Image (spheres, grey):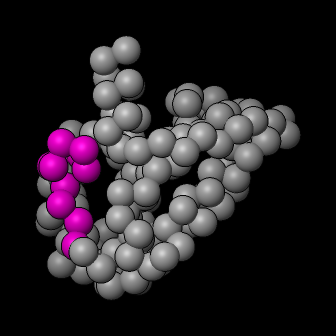
């Protein structure tokens, strides 16, 4: 399934590609295809925080950011542990955006080591500038 088809089908679309590819991918394949009530999710807040992606009003916009690279997240998970995660909600169209974010963080092992609520600005700026 291509990105546009997946965007029309999915309940949650998680952007884990490099930041520099996300805005064009969203504009080209997701914006016109994502349905109201779905959620778009990010592992880093850069594109939403700096306005490079401006999601539709009728969707949830959430971030689930493990504090480690993917191979570490997977490695800790397979050992029965987890990497701490940050969770943030930028738009809660469904009223369940935080629940979705917390469940995703828990599913990748973050619930075993800690999940901290933040916002897109704090996650992005502390990641880039501290």
Which residue, as the protein is rendered here, is positioned at the far right? 80
| Residue 97, percent from left and from top | 49, 67
Q: Is residue 119 left or right of residue 100?
A: left
> Which SS type dominates the magenta stretch?
loop
Relative to residue 14, is residue 43 depicted above or below? Answer: above
Q: Is residue 79 left or right of residue 123?
A: right
Name the residue at 40% across, 35% down: 123
Answer whether residue 98 is magenta in the image.
no
Name the residue at 65% across, 61% down: 103
- Can residue 74 be seen in the rendering of this structure? no
- Can residue 75 be seen in the rendering of this structure? yes
Q: Is residue 117 left or right of residue 92?
A: right
Name the residue at 41% across, 44% down: 119
The magenta-colored residue range is: 47-56
Q: Is residue 73 left or right of residue 13?
A: right
| Residue 111, percent from left and from top | 74, 46
| Residue 45, percent from left and from top | 34, 43
Name the residue at 25% across, 44% down: 49
For the C terminus, the quadrant is top left
For the N terminus, the quadrant is bottom left
Answer whether residue 49 is magenta in the image.
yes
Find residue 89 and report its image quarter.
Answer: bottom left
Which residue, as the protein is rendered here, is positioned at the far top? 130
Find residue 25 and report its image quarter.
Answer: bottom left
């Amino acid at each position: 399934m291509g990105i546009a088809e997946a965007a029309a089908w999915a309940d949650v679309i998680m952007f884990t590609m490099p930041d520099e590819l996300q805005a064009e991918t969203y504009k080209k394949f997701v914006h016109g295809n994502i349905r109201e009530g779905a959620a778009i999710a990010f592992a880093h807040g850069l594109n939403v925080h700096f306005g490079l992606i401006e999601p539709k009003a009728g969707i949830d916009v959430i971030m689930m950011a493990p504090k480690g690279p993917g191979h570490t997240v997977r490695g800790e998970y397979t050992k029965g542990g987890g990497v701490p995660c940050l969770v943030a909600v930028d738009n809660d169209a469904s009223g369940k955006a935080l629940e979705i974010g917390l469940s995703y963080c828990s599913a990748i092992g973050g619930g075993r080591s800690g999940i901290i609520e933040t916002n897109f600005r704090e996650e992005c700026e502390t990641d880039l500038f501290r």
